[in-house]
Amino acid sequence: MLALVKTAKGVGNIELRDVPEPSPQPGWVKIEVKAAAICGTDIHIKHDEFPYWPPVTLGHEFSGVIAELGEGVEDWQVGDRVVAEPHTLACGKCWLCRQGYIQVCPHKRSPGWGIDGAFAKYLVMPAKLLHRLPDSVSFDAGALVEPTANTVHDVLERGPVEPQDFVVVLGPGPIGLLAAQVAQAGGAREVMIVGAPGDAEMRLPVAEKVGIDHVVNLGETDPVELCLELTDGRGADLVVEASGAEPAINQAVALVRKKGRITVIGMTGKDDIRFTWDAAIFKACDIRFNLSTSYTSWDRTISLIEKRRIDVEALITHREPLERWEQVFDDVENLRALKGVLIP
């Protein structure tokens, strides 16, 4: 079968290869991939900026149907529509796993970087990580369950957003746009999303399309001034930092109210940055850092998508066969795309 493989360490080193079809081991299933979305992680792997074990087939945001059951698999049938948590090879024995935090197990090897992933016709996954995809949810939308589950975990479970909160989301990329919708679905009074002038052509219009209350181009409007105006001088109850940009990270502290909350999603890609530490202390704010998804966030996400509380398909700008991966990667990397979906 044809697969998009990171062949070796170093910048680039990605190519389409003919690889053997996988077979499921006991307790695992073989999945026929129907749609696979490109994540920022895939771009980082392309540039050698994220851990991975080559040669490895890329891709971890996907939906599909079960094509084969491994020995001992129960409660699943060939043909079932599924998505899957990317927490493969979590040991189940360490102190983190025993507390239910398999997503941060040091032995975890997710599809797309630790084991072969979804940019291929088939992949194999442990049956225990599967979630059913309702018939009313398209495979394209299913491919966006994983990134949406990240925001559900970070905003609803870890933030957490509370009813009547004023929420500010920094960064209108795919994660920021999902986080803003999740905040609305979680009961926020109003949500502001902030982008840079470079976001004006594609990203900010999508924010308006999905109904975010306040869409701000910081090249035209001071988001801190507007936030204070809209909150009677208090500031945001919850700030979601989804950009990973140093100026935005520091602006999060300026935006949040005293005793407010900052939930962190965006990665900087740097070893260290300047941070307004004392300003955060004087705000007495809570700052929570996040990584990956929880078990509970997946079913909540699927429900929100099924009930149309979140419009994930509005983010899909590219839908191409696997053979056109290079153009879609390039468009994602150069802000000519929001979410690109590849069809193996």
Image (cartoon, grey):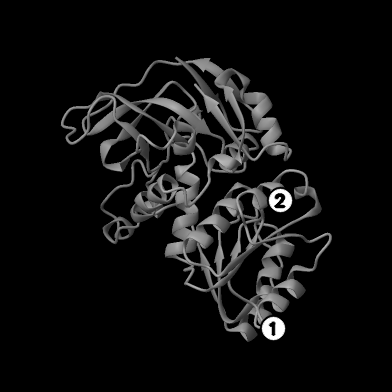
Asked if residue 103 is positioned above or below residue 25 in the image, the reply reads below
Task: Specify the farthest residue to the bottom.
Answer: 282
Asked if residue 47 is positioned above or below residue 242 in the image, the reply reads above
Q: Residues within 10 Å of mark 1 (few under 14, many from 20)?
A: few
Q: Nearer the viewer, residue 29 or 220?
A: 220
Q: Nearer the viewer, residue 61 or 309?
A: 309
Task: Name the image quarter holding the N terminus.
Answer: top left
Q: What percent of the width, then of the height, locates residue 296? A: 34, 55
Instruction: Name the residue rendered at 69%, 38% in the picture.
Output: 333
Residue receiving disc 2: 204
Q: Is residue 52 left or right of residue 33?
A: right
Q: What percent of the width, then of the height, locates residue 170? A: 66, 61
Residue 105 seen: no
Residue receiving disc 1: 233
| Labelled pair 1, 2 in contact (Cβ < 8 Å) | no
Q: Residues within 10 Å of mark 2 (few under 14, many from 20)?
A: many
Q: Is residue 55 left or right of residue 203?
A: left
Q: Nearer the viewer, residue 294 or 224?
A: 224
Q: Is residue 96 left or right of residue 161?
A: left
Q: What's the distance in space between the residues labelled 1 and 2, CA to CA?
A: 25 Å
Instruction: Name the residue rendered at 31%, 42% in the picture.
Output: 129
What's the amino acid at mark 1?
Answer: Gly
Q: What percent of the width, then of the height, locates residue 305? A: 44, 46
Identify the mark at residue 214; answer none if there is no mark: none
What's the amino acid at mark 2?
Answer: Leu
Q: What percent of the width, then of the height, locates residue 162? A: 47, 72
Instruction: Name the residue rendered at 45%, 16% in the picture.
Output: 19
- Which mark is first along the chain, 2 or 1? 2
Element under disc 1: loop
Instruction: Name the residue rendered at 68%, 25% in the picture.
Output: 327
